[in-house]
Image: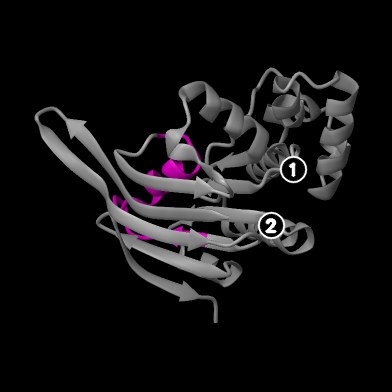
């Protein structure tokens, strides 16, 4: 599913080069729920952004299924993200002017699919996340936990091969964090959805199939859930 070999990412900070990733090699199987964990500044979000085509590595290779994404053009990367990947961010990234159903339908609308088909698919995934009755509400009418569930529904609407989640519980309290993590675990187990999630909370480990610990830009340890 995901194969990464000797991945490096160097940022130029003025006259100084900063190595955020220093030769990462990992494999993630289809259907796994993998947590990427490590201290602040360890490179965990940088790694997620490379895997999710949100940034370009300095060197190394990333293969998603049969596609070596490091060889794609910018236009091809944009289309690949739209067609094959889903994203959940800590700030929800919802459009405040749109209602819940319209927010969820955005990825399908961007594919130029018929609008009725987009809305039917949006309603279907909203039902899965328990928010169908909120489909006509605006973002400001939702709690933080509900907003994150809407963003998960948006990530699911295209039936993506992989969902990438970057600190999705960072702005939530413990109760709402558990709701979001239970939802992730449900779609992972029931739908076979592959999920790669960055987290810094130790108690989140109980939800992951496997944890990849990263420190100072290198893999420090890999651990299966006990």
Tell me the number on the disc at residue 52. Answer: none
From what the image shows, is residue 122 above or below residue 130? above
Label 2 with label 1: CB-CB less than 8 Å: no
> Alpha-carbon neighbours of circle 2 within 10 Å: few (<14), some, or many (≥20)?
some
From what the image shows, is residue 39 above or below residue 70? below
Secondary structure category for the residue under label 1 = loop
Q: Name the residue furthest bottom.
A: 226
Q: Residue at x 74, y 32 (%)?
A: 104
The span picked out in magenta is 35-55
Pinpoint residue 17: horizontal percent, then vertical percent: 15, 37
Pinpoint residue 177: horizontal percent, then vertical percent: 60, 56
In what quadrant of the picture does the N terminus appear?
bottom right
Mark 2 lies on residue: 179
Q: Is residue 179 magenta?
A: no
In what quadrant of the picture does the C terminus appear?
bottom right
Tell me the number on the disc at residue 159. Answer: 1
């Amino acid at each position: 599913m995901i194969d990464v070999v000797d991945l490096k990412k160097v940022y130029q900070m003025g006259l100084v080069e900063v190595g955020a990733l220093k030769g990462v090699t990992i494999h993630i199987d289809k259907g796994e729920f993998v947590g990427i964990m490590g201290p602040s500044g360890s490179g965990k979000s940088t790694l997620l952004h490379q895997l999710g085509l949100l940034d370009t590595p300095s060197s190394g290779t990333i293969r998603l299924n049969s596609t070596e994404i490091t060889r794609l053009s910018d236009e091809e990367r944009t289309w690949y993200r739209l067609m094959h990947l889903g994203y959940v961010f800590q700030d929800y990234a919802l459009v405040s002017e749109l209602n819940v159903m319209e927010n969820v339908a955005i990825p399908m609308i961007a594919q130029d699919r018929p609008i009725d088909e987009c809305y039917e698919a949006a309603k279907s995934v909203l039902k899965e996340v328990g928010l169908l009755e909120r489909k006509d509400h605006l973002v400001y009418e939702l709690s933080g936990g509900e907003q994150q569930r809407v963003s998960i529904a948006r990530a699911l609407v295209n039936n993506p091969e992989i969902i990438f989640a970057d600190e999705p519980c960072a702005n939530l309290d413990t109760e709402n964090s558990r709701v979001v993590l239970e939802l992730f675990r449900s779609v992972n187990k029931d739908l076979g959805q592959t999920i790669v999630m960055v987290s810094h909370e130790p108690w989140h480990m109980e939800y992951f199939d496997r944890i990849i610990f990263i420190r100072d830009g290198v893999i420090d340890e890999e651990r299966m859930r006990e």
